Amino acid sequence: MDERLLVFQEVAKTSNISLSAKKLHISQPTVTIQIKSLEKEYGAKFFNRSNKGVSLTKEGKIFYGYVQSVLDILTSAKEEIEALSKNQKKEIYLGATLTIGEYILPHLIAFLYRIHPEVEFKVKIANTESISQDILEKKMHIGLIEGPVAKNKSLNVESFWEDELVVVLPNFHPWASRKTIRLEELLNERILTREEGSGTRKVMEIMLKQSGLDPARLNIAMELGSTQAIKHAVAAGLGITIISSLTVSKESDRKIFKTLKIEDSPVYRPLNILTDAHIKKTKEENILINLLTNRDLIGRILSKDDYELEKPVIKPQLIASK
């Protein structure tokens, strides 16, 4: 691999020659020499230099796109060759945000493992920003995230599910016989919620504001750091909550909780698949993505408990070929 391309890529990312030298563990003059060598070879100036650092010229931006593609192809080739030479099991490096990682991903992996036991999953649970960065840096291949992500031409974003926020209460609550509720009715109830800054809390507050209600008027009885903790508190009769419908979708949950849809302002947030636009997906990665985009199958998997999925509900080859 031409070391000059790696140097060019790092300088383009950091817009700083000294910082790039530090990250690459080479001297600053070496970085400068490598860049000048490329500019001489291609007969173009790739960087504008100033006291604040460097920035890509028009020619540099064009060259950067090609450099990214070349390095991505070489990285993919290296991974495939290493896997072959070491006879490694096939691996999928996967990232997921909290709700997906806790309530969707385990069931999908369990289902896939029954069909393709040779595939191993390396999973990281993190926030959307962290997962996006890891995909851009080639640390993981597929990300499953809640809600939108900042536009980037190097990222492909594809929706695979819609997650609805619902009001959840214990089965012995006076409202348990109802199917829907108005937001203003929640103002006098004890509300259990995630901590300030959590994604679900933010969506809930936006929903209230859009309906003309001040979130400060809610009677927040308790703030908890996880959805599981909230569910336990609701089951104990300590209050009600607004959370993802996915978190109470199992048969075991439906015996304990009642979910009410919001009449005046139903809220849906997309669950997205995030991949690198410049990297060719492996056969195993395509199998996972094809499964994720099969909404009927996903719905059936998520509506059943693990013991009910002893046998695949569709043939393996149909997943791979869709």
Image: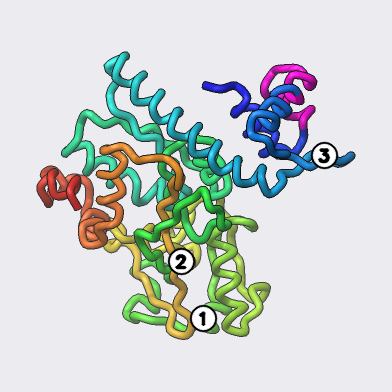
What residue sits 17% from the left and 45% below the top? 307
Q: Residue 34 in magenta?
A: no
- As rendered, which of 199 and 26 lies closer to the eye? 26
Which SS class for mark 1? helix
Instruction: Say above or below: 143 vs 146.
Output: above
- The x and y percentages for residue 171 are 34, 68
Q: Earlier in the sequence, mark 1 or mark 2?
A: 1
Callout 3, which amino acid? Arg
Residue with the most extreme top position:
86
Which SS class for mark 2? strand
Q: Which residues are magenta?
A: 17-32
* CA neighbours of label 1 inside 10 A, class few (<14), some (14 to 19), many (20+): some
Q: Is residue 174 visible?
A: no
Q: Pointer 3: what residue?
A: 49
Tell me where residue 247 sits by quadrant.
Answer: bottom left
Q: Earlier in the sequence, mark 3 or mark 2?
A: 3
Q: Is residue 54 visible?
A: yes
- The x and y percentages for residue 42 are 64, 34
Q: CA distance from mark 3 to mark 2?
A: 43 Å
- As rendered, which of 321 and 10 lies closer to the eye? 10
Callout 1, which amino acid? Leu
What residue sits 55% from the left and 69% below the top? 204
Between circles 3 and 2, the one closer to the viewer is 3
Q: Pointer 2: what residue?
A: 269
- As rendered, which of 88 and 166 lies closer to the eye? 88
* CA neighbours of label 2 inside 10 A, class few (<14), some (14 to 19), many (20+): some
Q: CA distance from mark 1 to mark 2?
A: 18 Å
Q: Earlier in the sequence, mark 1 or mark 3?
A: 3
What residue sits 19% from the left and 45% below the top? 320
Between circles 1 and 3, the one closer to the viewer is 3
Q: Pointer 1: what residue?
A: 183
